[in-house]
Structures are given as structure tokens and as C-alpha cells.
Amino acid sequence: MAGNSSRRGAGSRGKSKAAGSGGRIRKSLEGRGPTPKAEDRVYHKAYKAKQEALRRQASRPKRAPRAKAGADWVVGRNPVFEALTAGMPVKQVYLAEGAERDDRIRDILKYAAEHSIPLLQVPRSELDRVTGGLVHQGVALQLPSYDYAVPEELFADGVHGNAVFIACDGITDPRNLGAIIRSAAAFGAAGVVIPERRSASMTAAAWKTSAGAAARIPVAMAGNLNRALEQATDLGYTIVGLAGDGDVQVGGVPGADGPLVIVVGSEDEGLSRLVRAHCDHIASIPITSDVESLNASVAASIALYEASLQRPREV
């Protein structure tokens, strides 16, 4: 109809231009971010409930953290008795109140009484706590902290007596360490040196595997094994590292009849690069091609035996 042509917006010739918003409407539609949770809105009842719950929690008495059983604990009836009879040092024996007195418990009580070992009866809950929840069967044994020697002092004391030492590089299995200590004592070594980091230490497992030898031979802990080897070199020791690609067989190492440090590496990694660099000789143990390598403690035993052949035997 002809009259329709006069309507606003009808047809291109009658369309009027509206003023732009300049983005004001779009900005107002963006909002102010996500709506806060009810518990985070100060005037909401959920916020007040949350604050009240936090106040109640803060007013409760705090429980002591559950202790974790460390390397200084032996738990279980048979392990405790075996540790006692193996001559391991004992700080105290713990017995749970109400524990069934079977033959093994009676053996433990008898041994503790005969050897004046402190024995403490405690509630089972306390024994659970101090042993970190391990299956203790009502009895546990605590070892004292091991008193490590100082490497440079051992080296200084032994240099004039052509002493032999074993240094462990990357021996992380405490049973391997215990076996090395046992071999060192058997072949007359003057001590064992271990690094402070990335190494097994004198745990219950090491004590047990040493079969009491750890009580007869000092174990020194070096803050830096490479530095300890440098000190030994300065004192006149020959440093021999054990490795399959050695340039000399272990039975023919020059200087093995004098002050000697034998370095044993881990089975997986062998000697570390820096430790190898501090060795005067890298010695190999001849084995068949069917076997890739020897256990670290076995290798240490063979090297100690070869060294013992080159020095006078004590009668």
C-alpha cells in the first residue's frame, strides 16, 4: 500500500540511522566474573556456618603426628629375638601390655634379663605409634643411633700400619652394606667408608647382615666421598676402584701391599664418574662371559682377599 512507504524503517530510503552505543551495552553484558560461592559471601548464612566450623576445628586439641618406623626399629617376635642373639646393639625392648606370652616372647624376656637390656611395657596403641603401624606382634626393639667415625681420622690412624679400607660408592642396599662390613672384618680391613648421601646407612638390616661385625669394625660417613678419597691420597694411600673394564686385574694392583682404599660401586651404575677419576687404578675381577657382573659385596670380598695375600697374615 502507498501509505506504508511513510513508516519508519520501511524501505531503504525511509530508514533512519540510530546512534551507536560505543560498546557500552556490550561491556555491561560482560558481567563481573563468576558469582562467588555462597560460603565466600560475607553476608550469606553459608559463610557464617563455614567460619563457625573453622573456629571449632581450631579449638580441638591437636593429635600428635603418627610416628613412622625408621631404620632404628626391629619389629616382630622372631626378628627381635634374632636381632638380640646376633649381638646387635639395643637401646630398649618394647613389649605391648597384654601380649600373649608364647615361647618366643619368653625367650626375649629371658635374654633381656640375662643381658641387662632395658625392657618397657607400653599400651599396644603406643607401640603402634612408635613403630609407625607395622605388624609388631606385640614386641619391638629400638637400636641406638650409630656413632659414625670420621674418614680422615681413620685414614690418618691407619696409614702407618698399611691399613686397608673399603669405600662404598652408591651402595644403597643395607644388606649389601652389612655383607661388605662382614667381609671387611673377616679380612682384617681397618674400616668402611660410606657417603652421607645416596647410600645405605647403618640400619637394622645392615647390622643384622653384618652378623655382629659392625660392632668390631668402624664405619665412617663422609660428607663428600671424593673429598675423602683426596685426603686418603694425600696421606699416601693407593686408591683402587673395582670395575669390569679395569686396566689391571685385582690380584696385580701396584701398591696393594701398602696403605690401600678399595672402592666398590653399585651393581647397576658401577663407579660414578668423579669417584673413578679419583682412583689410581681401576681393577677388574676376571669372570666368565656368561655372568655380566658380581654382587657388590662379593666383589669387595674378592678384592679384600687378594689384598690380604700381599701383606703379612696375623697369627
Image (cartoon, rainbow, N blue to C red):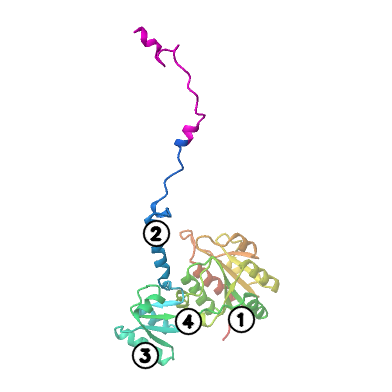
Dot 2 amino acid type: Lys
Residue at position x 54%, y 76% in the image: 184
Please identify, in this view, whether the residue under mark 3 or under mark 2 is nearer the observer. 2
Q: Nearer the viewer, residue 247 or 32?
A: 32
Count neighbours of disc 3 (C-alpha within 10 A) and say few if under 14, some if 14 to 19, many if 20 or more: few
Label 3 to label 2: alpha-carbon separation:
62 Å
Q: Nearer the viewer, mark 4 or mark 1?
A: 4
Disc on res. 110: 3
What segment carries the magenta color?
A: 1-27
Pick whichever of labels 4 and 1 is earlier in the sequence: 4
Q: Which mark is first along the chain, 1 or 3? A: 3
Distance from the alpha carbon under mark 4 to that under mark 3: 20 Å
Instruction: Read off the residue under disc 4.
Output: 212
The residue identified by callout 1 is 312
Task: Return the disc, 2 or 1, that comes first in the chain's sequence.
Answer: 2
Q: Splitting the image into 4 quarters, where does residue 231 fall?
A: bottom right
Q: Position of residue 6 (x, y in %)?
A: 40, 11
Image location of residue 32, percent across then percent down: 46, 42
Give me the C-alpha separation between circle 3 and circle 1: 44 Å
